[in-house]
Amino acid sequence: MATTFTPAQLAKNLDRMRTIAFALPEVTEEVTWGTDINFRVRKKIFLFPGAGGSICVKADREELPALLDDPRCHPAPYLARGGWIVLDFDTVKVDWEEVRELVTTSYCLIAPKTLVAKVL
């Protein structure tokens, strides 16, 4: 059963995701489709943080089956063919190291190799 986050908790989650994303080279934040926040590297999206209760990222093809076996994960609407997943934050205690790893992996799958070399 998903946790209902307060507006303050959602804002705090978004701030944590911003910190993770902006630690990577050449990241920008944009709002598209009216209100949807997304993080990009050289204009290519690598993270949709939603309202702060989940993330949508591109997953490594080798890790995809294990991620989809996790009840918190499901294929991303419209993006699943490309290997994108949604991880729902279903507990008040979010595993931020797991989030950092998923965001970094997504970044590395999207970013140019020259930028990925600065991360690895």
Image: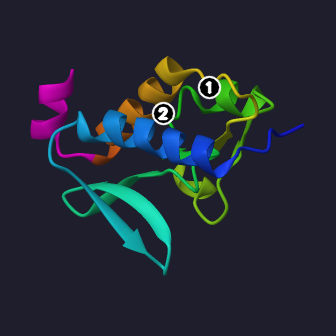
Neighbour tally class for label 1: few under 14, some 14-19, many 20 plus, Cα within 10 Å = some
Please give the residue where the numbered disc 2 appears in the rendered image: 60
Q: Is residue 2 left or right of residue 46?
A: right
Residue 3 visible somewhere in the drawing? yes
Q: Is residue 116 magenta?
A: yes
Question: Which of the numbered marks, if any, corresponds to residue 106?
Answer: none
Q: How is the image coloured?
A: rainbow
Q: Nearer the viewer, residue 19 or 47?
A: 19
Q: Is residue 17 above or below residue 117?
A: below
Q: Which residue is mark 1?
A: 94
Q: Amino acid at mark 1?
A: Val
Write the residue at 42% across / 42% down: 15
Q: Name the quadrant of the C terminus.
A: top left
> Which residues make up the magenta segment?
111-120
**47 on left or right of 77:** left
Residue 106 lies in the magenta stretch: no
SS for callout 1 = loop
The percent position of residue 30, horizontal first and vertical second, equals 33, 66
> How far apart are the alpha carbons under marks 2 and 1?
21 Å
Q: Nearer the viewer, mark 2 or mark 1?
A: 1
Which circle's residue, 2 or 1, is located before the other in the chain? 2
> What amino acid is found at the position of numbered circle 2 in the picture?
Asp
In terms of depth relative to the viewer, which is nearer, 80 or 54?
54
Residue 85 seen from this side: no
Q: What secondary structure is marked by label 2?
A: loop
Q: Quadrant of the N terminus?
A: top right
93 shown above or below 87: above
Residue 24 pos. (x, y %): 22, 36
Name the residue: 50% across, 29% down: 99
